[in-house]
């Protein structure tokens, strides 16, 4: 029996190259194979039980869908609208035209001048504001009221200047303090400024009026217990607060 001849070198090379160029059957992905794999994966997922965390997340999502979300919008005008329904009391008003007399005799350019009060009162009248208020007559504070806060020396000093027309004397006394001037009418007008402020606060505390404004001068907020200071002689607001605490039962 004869042996078949061995393949030629060229034939062996061609067979080897053909073998290399053909990919393994397991790496070939066909459309039909992909469809089968997808169906198989779904079947496996349907049969498997989801984890507790997945179940909790799904339950939370379902509850969230059932809940209605209400957005609360704040109405910035609600307080103003509600206040229209409230019964309002009157606004008190007090001033004294004579307070324009208090001025510096030796310096016409002094910043604290009658026009500071006159301009405010005129503007209130122009806007017809005063007619809408309940006006009260001004009154002077008593010495007892002043001494509830101030030193007797302040009262006694200012009393010596009352209706004193000696300009040199008034300037000399004024120069002993910080940023004040004294006019012959200063003491009387300072008493009226303090007393009118006290009276306005008392009317508010007692409920006679809802609120009020006292357009007065000399001003008072810089005045100290034992000396005038910064245009001020008697501390009008502090005296009114002291009166409310001592006489009207206000706590603070």
Image (cartoon, rainbow, N blue to C red):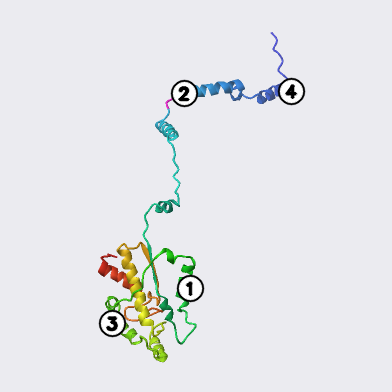
Q: Which mark is residue 46?
A: 2
Of the 4 image quadrants, the one containing the N terminus is top right
Q: Quarter of the image holding residue 114?
A: bottom left
How crowded is the residue under tag 3: few (<14 C-alpha within 10 Å), some, or many (20+)? some
Closer to the N terminus: mark 1 or mark 2?
2
Kindly report the distance in space between the C-alpha atoms of the residues bearing marks 2 and 4: 56 Å
Q: Give the residues drawn in magenta, as a range.
A: 45-49
Closest to the observer, 14 or 85: 85
Residue 152 marker:
3
Label 2 close to label 4 by CB (< 8 Å): no
Q: Would you say residue 233 is visible in this rendering? A: no
Mark with earlier residue (2, 4): 4
Label 3 to label 1, Cα distance in Å? 34 Å
Tag nearer the camera, 1 or 2: 1
Frontmost of labels 3 and 2 is: 3
As drawn, the residue found furthest toward the top would be: 1
Instruction: Name above or below for residue 198 compared with residue 35.
Output: below
Q: Earlier in the sequence, mark 3 or mark 2?
A: 2
Kindly report which numbered mark, 4 or 3, lies closer to the viewer in this rendering: 3
Q: Earlier in the sequence, mark 4 or mark 3?
A: 4
- The one nearer the camera, 130 or 52, is 130
What label does residue 119 carry, if any?
1
Indicate the quadrant containing the C terminus: top left, top right, bottom left or bottom right.
bottom left
Q: Is residue 79 visible?
A: yes
Residue 180 spot, x, y in % from top left: 41, 82
According to the picture, the residue beneath numbered tag 4 turns out to be 10
């Amino acid at each position: 029996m004869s042996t078949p001849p061995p393949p030629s070198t060229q034939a062996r090379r061609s067979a080897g190259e053909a073998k290399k160029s053909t990919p393994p059957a397991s790496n070939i992905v066909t459309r039909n194979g992909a469809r089968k794999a997808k169906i198989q994966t779904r079947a496996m997922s349907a049969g498997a039980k989801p984890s507790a965390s997945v179940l909790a997340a799904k339950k939370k999502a379902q509850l969230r869908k059932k809940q209605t979300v209400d957005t609360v919008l704040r109405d910035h005008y609600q307080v103003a609208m509600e206040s229209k329904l409230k019964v309002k009391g009157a606004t008190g008003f007090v001033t004294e035209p004579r307070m324009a007399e208090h001025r510096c005799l030796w310096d016409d350019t002094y910043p604290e001048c009658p026009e500071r009060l006159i301009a405010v009162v005129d503007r209130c009248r122009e806007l017809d504001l005063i007619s809408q208020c309940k006006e009260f007559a001004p009154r002077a504070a008593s010495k007892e009221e002043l001494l509830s806060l101030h030193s007797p020396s302040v009262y006694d000093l200012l009393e010596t200047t009352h209706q004193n027309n000696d300009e040199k004397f008034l300037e000399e006394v004024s120069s002993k303090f910080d940023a004040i001037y004294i006019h012959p009418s200063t003491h009387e007008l300072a008493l009226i400024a303090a007393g009118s402020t006290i009276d306005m606060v008392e009317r508010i505390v007692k409920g006679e009026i809802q609120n009020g404004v006292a357009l007065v001068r000399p001003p008072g907020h810089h005045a100290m217990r034992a000396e005038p200071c910064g245009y001020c002689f008697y501390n009008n607001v502090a005296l009114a607060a002291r009166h409310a605490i001592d006489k009207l039962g206000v706590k603070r």
